Image: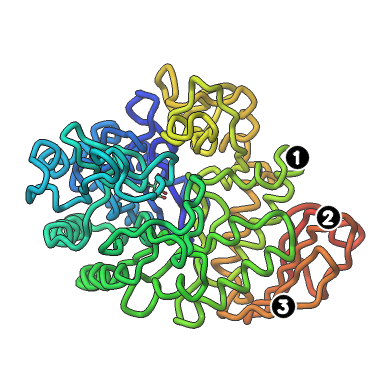
Amino acid sequence: MFYQVYVRSFADANTDGVGDLRGVRDRLGYLSLLGIDALWLTPFYRSPMADHGYDVADPRDVDPIFGNLDDLDELIRAAHQEGLRVTIDLIPNHTSDRHPWFMAAGSAPPGSAERERYFFRPGRGPDGAMPPNNWLSVFGGPAWSRLPDGEWYLHLFAPQQPDLNWSHPDVVADFEQTMQFWLDRGVDGFRLDVAHGMAKPADLPDMAEPQAPGVLKHADHEADPRFDNDGVHDLHRMIRRVADKYADRVLTGEAWVVDDDRLARYVRPDELHLAFNFRLLEADWNAEMFVEAITHSLNAMSSVDAPPTWVLSNHDMDRHVTRYGGGELGTRRARAAALVQLALPGVAYVYNGDELGLPNVELPDEALQDPVWERSDHADRGRDGERVPLPWNGAEPPYGFTEGPGTWLPMPADWGGLAVEAQLDDPDSMLSLYRNALEIRREHPAMSGDEVQWFGAPTGCLAFRRTGGLVCALNAADELVPMPPGEVVLSSGPLEDGMLPPDTAAWLV
Ligand code: GLC
């Protein structure tokens, strides 16, 4: 059971309004109480923050905004003492444009060795004024930017995130060094950013049909040469070899790959251990879509004997309370979805704030910071709405997130009831639901085994049984439905005369 800490938004210890490593350390007691096993910390490396830390200028140091290396060591030590593992984010696909390599490349002439660690190419058309190919940036606009000397460089994300050339031995050697640097400090593993990127086809062919921009859509390798190239698997094997020099470390890949069999390739026995299943996160509030997402993922993973990895929200996608309709309805559905997610075999990731039932926040234009907003010419508001700082206590912003005067994104005036303190002792709160569910998931023998057996269920509903005997039933339809037989051990909302109401899930044994 992993918990994703979006470090900027979790807890701020130094009062600058941005979350930091000491803030995480100070709240480890809360995470223990919640009942998770491991953390995933989003990037805290030295960065100009063009993409909030996913643009890394020095992958082996902590950005002062988040603290320093001693703070990280202390966090790892304290987490281990609490019995929590610590995994961190690594960003292999690109660096910051302020990374020493890219700075050197920018001041070196076209054709120089310094440029070979990235993708520099002459343009097309008269005077090379057109980009070298038709690839689009995931964040909008062309995936190429031009330097004053006329050469173009590739960036699948923001222009401040130039793509690394993984055919270059320096890139491989440096990444190994970075992994070892953190593994030696005691981190328990990595989440690999854009794990389906990295390898590019040598001739950088045009895309068949330029995919519309939009943050991270599933890539189809047939039509989209930017992602999921076969060459990426040798790189993951290399990464696995480094991790295997240490005992008990885990590698989780972010691989947005359309095809289940292609996704399974990332978790073959000599590659990564886990790969996020984003199909569940992409499914609408619809039992058939849930069943399909779950079945696909289980089949894909069982073909390579890897555990499935379930996720409902993260820092890149609208929060599920909002996706399922927002307000009371969205919250009721989010409670039910949590019971589906947490009943499944394998690994689950909770995104910080899922356990509080946080919705997305509609931020005013002037507050928006995600590069997607500018890159899309304001067509896409970006991901700030799911990154608003967490409310801890009190009735008004900043709800104990910081003792400073402001927060890096404004917090809504009506989040007092969602604060941790307000939910802790309320048996009906989202937080209590998560704590109960996690305890059962951890301790109940009915949760054992890898198999999921589907039951016939009324239209708009689903029901499955785990090997150990736990049954999970979800009613995503509009009418009351009968419950499967068994004793209810947890439900996401009140039952009515033994029937399962709409937008409700229950666990039975
Ligand atoms: C990943 C991250 C996302 C980031 C992108 C570029 O998808 O999750 O937040 O913007 O990679 O590094």
Picture coordinates of residue 185, whole percent (x, y): 20, 55
Dot 3 lies on which element? strand
Task: Work out how far the residue at label 2 is from the one at label 3, CA to CA, in angstroms.
Answer: 20 Å
Picture coordinates of residue 402, whole percent (x, y): 42, 26
Q: Can residue 505 be spotted in the picture?
A: yes
Earlier sequence position, callout 2 versus callout 1: 1
Q: Residue at x 74, y 66 (%)?
A: 288
Task: Work out how far the residue at label 3 is from the one at label 1, CA to CA, in angstroms.
Answer: 29 Å
Q: CB atoms at circles 2 and 1 under 8 Å apart?
A: no
Q: CB atoms at circles 2 and 3 under 8 Å apart?
A: no
Say what amino acid the circle numbered 2 marks. Answer: Pro
Q: Quadrant of the C terminus?
A: bottom right
Q: Residue at x 29, y 63 (%)?
A: 199
Q: Residue at x 39, y 36 (%)?
A: 8
Report which residue position mark 3 lands on: 454
Q: Residues within 10 Å of mark 2 (few under 14, many from 20)?
A: many
Q: Viewer-proximal residue, 68 or 233?
A: 233
Q: Residues within 10 Å of mark 3 (few under 14, many from 20)?
A: some
Q: Viewer-proximal residue, 496 or 314?
A: 314
Given the current orientation, which residue lies at the most extreme front position? 126
Report which residue position mark 2 lands on: 502
Earlier sequence position, callout 2 versus callout 3: 3
Q: Is residue 108 left or right of residue 10?
A: left
Report which residue position mark 1 lands on: 328
Dot 1 lies on which element? helix
Picture coordinates of residue 152, whole percent (x, y): 24, 42
